[in-house]
Amino acid sequence: MAEEFVLDWKVDQPAIQAGHSESLYTLVTIRPNIAKLGDLLESAGDSAALPAHLIVVVDVSGSMHELIQADPDARVVGHGSSEGKDVAYVESDVPSRLQVAERVVQRLVSRLTPLDRMSIVAFDHQAYPLARCATAGELQQALRQFADTGGGGTSMGRGFQAVLGCLPARDDG
């Protein structure tokens, strides 16, 4: 049976060497399967769009608190450890990786229509489901939780495992 949507993805690099830290970027595109949804799309017309359920998975591990670029004007306000390494806590006008991720999620929320829904799962060494199938108005509490969530090591698998709890049950019978 044909699926209603097709998922295309591209990864910027095929592998990461063991013992090396690398950034990995993935572009994911979800598009309607015209063969399955053709009649529905035609009856909806050009002005109507299908409601979306976005599932956003956000890394909130300790490394996400690093600045996105070096800031020579940053002021050290303390010292500690993150993911087993000594770190300096700084005040800076340069945003952290986590702040950038928060802004991206806020932008996605601001573009939701009243029929759209979003689920948000944050993860470090464990998963934190912050919102499940929520409307834009219901997502404000989840957005406020980013700053106080996580900070440990990184286990992307736990984040993606928690996504399963955000998916509606499907009855193919």
Image (cartoon, rainbow, N blue to C red):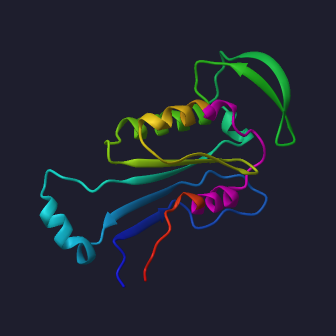
In the picture, measured across the screen, residue 84 lies left or right of residue 23, that is right
In the picture, measured across the screen, residue 138 lies left or right of residue 163, that is left
- Identify the residue at image location x=17%, y=72%: 39
Specify the quadrant that holds the N terminus.
bottom left
- x then y, percent, for residue 66: 68, 33
Q: Above or below — where is 111 with respect to 16?
A: above
**Most common secondary structure along the magenta stretch:** helix
Q: How many marks?
A: 0
Specify the quadrant that holds the C terminus.
bottom left
- x then y, percent, for residue 133: 48, 50
- x then y, percent, for residue 89: 76, 23
In the picture, measured across the screen, residue 39 lies left or right of residue 33, that is left
Q: Foreground residue, 71 or 64?
A: 64
Provide the residue span drawn in magenta.
145-164
Name the image quarter holding residue 35. bottom left
Q: Is residue 61 magenta?
A: no
Instruction: Tell me, yes or no, if residue 68 can be seen here.
Output: no
- x then y, percent, for residue 5: 35, 69
- Identify the residue at image location x=51%, y=62%: 167
Q: Above or below — where is 112 with respect to 50?
A: above
Instruction: Tell me, yes or no, if residue 26 can be seen here.
Output: yes
- Identify the residue at image location x=69%, y=31%: 148
Q: Above or below — where is 81 with respect to 152?
A: above
Q: Foreground residue, 74 or 89?
A: 89
- Identify the residue at image location x=31%, y=42%: 113
Name the image quarter holding residue 51. bottom left
